[in-house]
Image: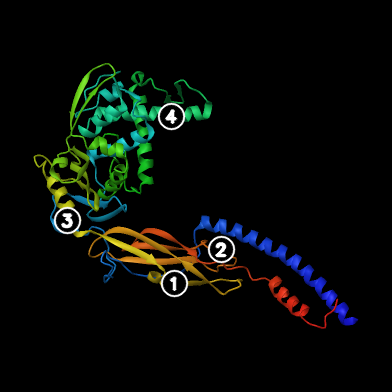
Amino acid sequence: MKTRYFFILLAITLIMIKVVNGQVEKNFINNKTAEREKLSKILFNNESIISNRVKEKNNDNTSDNVKEIKDNNSSGLSKLRLYSKAACVYDAKSNRVLCGDNENMQLPMASTTKIMTCIIALEYGDLEQEIVFSKYAASMPNVQLNAIKGEKFKLKDLLHSLMLESHNDTAVAIAENIAASVELKEYNAISGGSKGVKQEGKFIGNNIEENSIEMSKKLVEKFAQLMNKKAVELGATSTNFVTPNGLDADKHYTTAADLCKIAGYAIKNQEFINITNRKYYSLVSVEGKEYSLNNANSFLSMYNGAIGCKTGYTSKAGYCFVGAIDKGEHRLVSAVLASGWPPNKSYKWSDTIKIMDFACGEYQNKELEIDNETLNIERINVENGVKEYGKVHIQEQFNLLLGPEDKIRYKVVMPKGLHAPLYKNEKVAVCRVYINDDKYKEFSVVMKETVKLKSYERSFNRLFKIFTQFKYLKV
């Protein structure tokens, strides 16, 4: 009888433990879910390196030997004996600098500035919107479209004036009108207003032709703020814009590397390519006046696969040029700054051809594969799991332009202490890909299987099963 009561009491106890433990496990999982959400925002700040390997897969499926890490700053192009004070070549597909010579030296950039002016106009403006010339815009020095105060054009037409013949008055007209439209949107968002007004020294609206010189300059400053904000977004952190046309000004500068980043972003916009790739263009003002434009970019006819971008010259900056090509596996952007002064106008072309040829010859497309074998990782430790280990999976392939001295390195990092439950396809680590010393990109390492939480419930269930199998137990 005592034995019978003992097992009844044991069964009741097990049931109560099961209920309580189920709630505990539920709370644990909920807490763990919140922890994971927080972790995804922090992205492995408290990381543990579990693999740091180098491997490369060529198109012929053979592994190359890897050389020591080499600082790629000012490498490659310095041996070409360029006329330019600074030069750079950039891979627009992978968004990275391939080679350069003084590519991080801050220099004035003349009308190559207008690449960013065009970007801002395309992103903030409407191609069909009317742009009106103010007195200030019409007063800009050569090179000019020679529009007069109050004359109106479609934005799409003025972008050709900006990029083909590099008109300084056009750049200011675009800047004023785009800045005014941005301020109008900001004003409407706050007040719900729809009419142009003046408020606290700012112009809100589209009555540009009535602007004072001072008001026009404030709008140009507003536009420069948009340019600088975009530069930071693109990683062009050694750049500062003051003018939309590139005329010499204090604190108006960039680097060859930054110019390549900006132009590399620009050529992702097909409208930008359509504009800069045209050799001729005709436009008509809203009032009916006709204008004919010729593209000053002779590189379009000099180099197979050329698709843009922009020339520049001032007495302070010298000759400058940003070029772009799309040639087979190579989609490259180049920049040369301070490439001679008059009468050496051709230096920028010869230097650009030289560095483009160098990059196309030295940098070849390689197929890279990342998998478990590459990283030498098959499983990870799991705390509080029904198993001590869980299998993980990674399988990624991508193509990359690599030079003979480039080193590829993979590093897998994860949080310290991974707790069950872990679910299939759940992200548990990242694989970071480095080219030389620079991080290129990263991929997710995920669970290949689910590892459930180890709990006392399962232990008691097994114990209860053992007891109920006793033949002499009769309840």
Residue type for callout 3: Phe
Pick whichever, 237 or 371, lies toward us.
371
User: Mark 1 or mark 4, which has the lower sequence index?
Assistant: 4
Splitting the image into 4 quarters, where does residue 317 fall? top left
Could you tell me residue 149's position as x and y percent? 28, 19
**Callout 1 touching callout 4 (CB < 8 Å):** no
Could you tell me residue 443's position as x and y percent? 42, 60
Residue type for callout 1: Ile
Q: Secondary structure at mark 2?
A: loop
Pick whichever, 221 or 24, lies toward us.
24
Q: Is residue 249 visible?
A: no
Q: Say which mark, if any, is on residue 183.
A: 4
Q: Secondary structure at mark 1?
A: loop
User: Mark 3 or mark 4, which has the lower sequence index?
Assistant: 4
For label 2, the crowd category at 10 Å Cα-Cα, with few meaning under 14, some 14 to 19 and many 20 or more, is some
Seen at 88% across and 77% down, the residue is 5
Left or right position of 288 against 464 = left
Residue type for callout 2: Tyr
Residue 140, placed above or below residue 456: above
For label 3, the crowd category at 10 Å Cα-Cα, with few meaning under 14, some 14 to 19 and many 20 or more, is some
Q: Quadrant of the C terminus?
A: bottom right
- Between disc 2 and disc 1, the foreground one is 2
**Which residue appears farthest toward the right when viewing the image?**
1
User: Mark 1 or mark 3, which has the lower sequence index?
Assistant: 3
**Residue topped by disc 3:** 358
